[in-house]
Amino acid sequence: MKHGNIAKEAREHARPYCVSDGGKFRLKDFDPNDTGTLKSKEHAEGMLARGVELLSHLQEKLYAQDRWAVLLIFQAMDAAGKDGVIKHVMSGVNPQGCEVTSFKAPSEEELDHDHLWRTNKHLPERGRIGIFNRSYYEEVLVVRVHSELLKRQKIPEQLVTKEIWEQRFEDINCYERYLTRNGILIRKFFLHVSKKEQKKRFLERLEDSKKNWKFSMADVKERGFWKDYQKAYEEMIQHTANKRAPWYVVPADNKWFTRLVVAGGIIDALWELDLSFPDVGPEKREELAAVREVLLHGEE
């Protein structure tokens, strides 16, 4: 199958979940159990395999061209499948050109800096893909739901007003505008899992000794703030989804479909960059011709 056809196939499954105008966004319009026009897991896995192969090819061009950088941001409730999506979708990408950074609770050093400092250090360089497993968006999600966390950030009291969340949305938009103007392509993925499916996955983790390490009582307690988180996610997307840095609201109740949509969103973005391998120029071609001649006839 030609690369152009694979890209078109990927685009068709990803674009329905792309939000580039946050003002009209309502989370209730997106079904976590949606599988688009697909009903077969096997069919989706075949398309994903083709997509992963194309993604590897596009990443090779990105690395060789050394002009663009790509930042992929993943946000979700616990057990939505961020780790699995990153693992499966990026499985064919050369590790030399890709770095995954997972952001946990901020350290004391990080709390002594502004809220964009710790992520800024991990931005991808040109030619590479950077993946943020959670990100600076935690500042308008968990910190907003648990406002007591704001006190740990040591912000001067007179600056902590009721406008702080609007101000942080503005900061993020300005920051992402700056990054895109410097050649960093940004795509953001919210894995939208239902409360019912999260409960099912939590129970599976308890039954599987290999996954027990992923679970704690704190995860269960966070379920008590479900409505607060859904509201925070909705407002986050409303305020920060735009054409230069869109959000994908990815149905996450079916992992096989989640992976397909994420792969499609990444492929669609990279394909539109019209990447190509650099032209080495006449002098380099002459050098390569000489090398070929030595290898063919100049060695004993």
Image: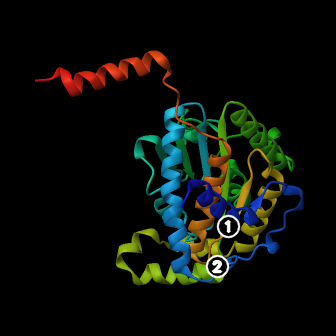
Q: Is residue 229 left or right of residue 75?
A: right
Q: Quick one: SS at disc 1?
A: helix
Residue 238 visible somewhere in the drawing: yes
For marks 2 and 1, the one nearer the N-term is 1
Q: Residue 13 bears which disc, if any?
A: 1
Q: Is residue 196 above or below residue 182?
A: below
Q: Residue furthest left?
A: 300
| 136 shown above or below 28 | above
Q: Amino acid at mark 1?
A: His
Q: Is residue 42 left or right of residue 227?
A: left
> Which amino acid type is marked by label 2?
Leu
Question: In the image, is 235 to the left or to the right of 93?
Answer: right
In the rendered structure, find residue 149 and report the number of the disc placed on it.
none
* Image point (81%, 46%), residue name: 164
Name above or below for residue 10 compared with residue 130. Answer: below
Q: Classify the position of the C terminus by image quarter.
A: top left
Residue 39 sits in quarter: bottom right
How crowded is the residue under tag 2: few (<14 C-alpha within 10 Å), some, or many (20+)?
few
Label 2: which residue? 38
Specify few, some or many for label 1: CA neighbours under 10 Å numbering under 14, 14-19, or 20 or more: many
Tell me the element at label 2: loop
In three-dimensional space, the C-alpha distance between marks 2 and 1, rounded to whole angstroms, equals: 9 Å
Give the x, y percent position of residue 212: 40, 74
* Contact between labelled residues 1 and 2, with CB atoms less than 8 Å apart: yes
Q: Nearer the viewer, residue 163 or 148?
A: 163
